[in-house]
Image (tube, rainbow, N blue to C red):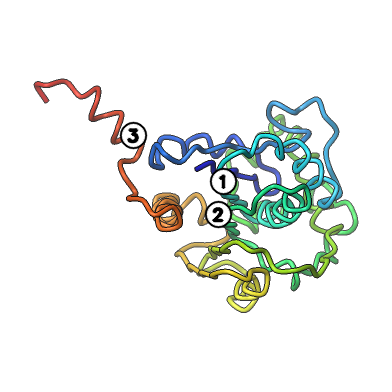
């Protein structure tokens, strides 16, 4: 089972590389990097979410010759939703599960406040409000000079998103929310209308970046959901499997 993971605003998909040793070995974690960051740093930043999703669908369609699932957090959840539709339009089978994390449903999103580029000061304040960036990073001028253009482009994508009603996805939709996040339960529940299959909503402790603070619980629930969908046992985490092979006999 391939798990394609999409980043959140201002982030790199390589954040998910650590999940490879935390999920069972039968789940193949594939970070999906967007242009303008990580290994794609030399490409122009995207500012239109639907154009980005179409580009990613074109890049990934030929690679998806087996079962897969999609995971996205915050803006990444919206791109994952559009990517799922884009892959279906290209004749690719539906994902086993669409995991949407920390994002209101596409039909109820309101991106008005993000339609104009934010100043550096406004972007910094948003980072503080979201509570996902350490203070030492915020005070690192060199780091912020490289991070703010990415964040500005991603916020513009939030503002540019226009929901298009379509036939519900034929795959399960599993939504995660933070108990202390600004996103309301009603906005998370609204994802239910985007699937003709099963719908699950899990509320985890924490604010918008529960993806960090509740990482172990989040990953356990992802693994369990994929195991149920695949009809298999969860199995050993990669790290446990690694320890079982390499642990000295005297320990």
Of the pair 132 and 92, the residue shown nearer to us: 92
Mark 3 nearby-residue class (10 Å; few <14, some 14–19, many ≥20): some
Side of 235 where 51 appears, left or right: right
The residue shown at (11%, 25%) is 251
* Quadrant in the rendering for residue 185: bottom right
Q: Name the residue that disc number 2 marks.
A: 96
Q: Name the residue that disc number 3 marks.
A: 239
Provide residue 17's location: percent of width, then percent of height.
Answer: 52, 34
Side of 122 where 213 appears, left or right: left
* Quadrant in the rendering for residue 150: top right
Q: Nearer the viewer, mark 3 or mark 1?
A: 1
Q: Name the residue that disc number 1 marks.
A: 68
Q: Secondary structure at mark 3?
A: helix
The residue shown at (82%, 29%) is 43
Provide residue 39's location: percent of width, then percent of height.
Answer: 69, 26
Side of 167 where 16 appears, left or right: left
In the rendered view, tell whether residue 21 sits above or below residue 119.
above
């Amino acid at each position: 089972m391939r798990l394609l993971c999409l980043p959140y605003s201002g982030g790199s998909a390589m954040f998910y590389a650590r999940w490879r040793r935390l999920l069972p070995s039968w789940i193949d974690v594939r970070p999906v990097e967007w242009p303008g960051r990580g290994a794609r740093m030399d490409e122009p930043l995207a500012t239109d979410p639907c154009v980005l999703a179409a580009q990613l669908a074109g890049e990934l369609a030929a690679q998806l010759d087996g079962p897969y699932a999609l995971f996205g957090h915050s803006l990444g959840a919206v791109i994952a939703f559009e990517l799922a539709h884009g892959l279906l339009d290209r004749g690719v089978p539906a994902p086993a599960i669409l995991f949407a994390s920390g994002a209101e449903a596409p039909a109820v999103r309101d991106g008005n406040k993000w339609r104009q580029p934010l100043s550096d000061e406004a972007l910094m304040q948003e980072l503080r409000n979201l509570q996902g960036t350490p203070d030492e990073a915020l005070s690192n001028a060199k780091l912020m000079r490289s991070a703010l253009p990415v964040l500005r482009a991603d916020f513009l994508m939030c503002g540019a998103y226009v929901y298009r009603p379509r036939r519900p996805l034929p795959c399960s939709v599993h939504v995660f929310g933070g108990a202390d996040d600004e996103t309301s339960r009603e906005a998370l529940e609204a994802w239910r209308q985007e699937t003709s299959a099963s719908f699950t909503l899990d509320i985890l402790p924490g604010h918008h970046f529960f993806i960090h603070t509740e990482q172990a619980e989040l990953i356990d629930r992802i693994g369990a959901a994929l195991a149920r969908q695949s009809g298999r046992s969860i199995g050993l985490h990669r790290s446990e499997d690694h320890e079982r092979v390499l642990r000295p006999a005297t320990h």
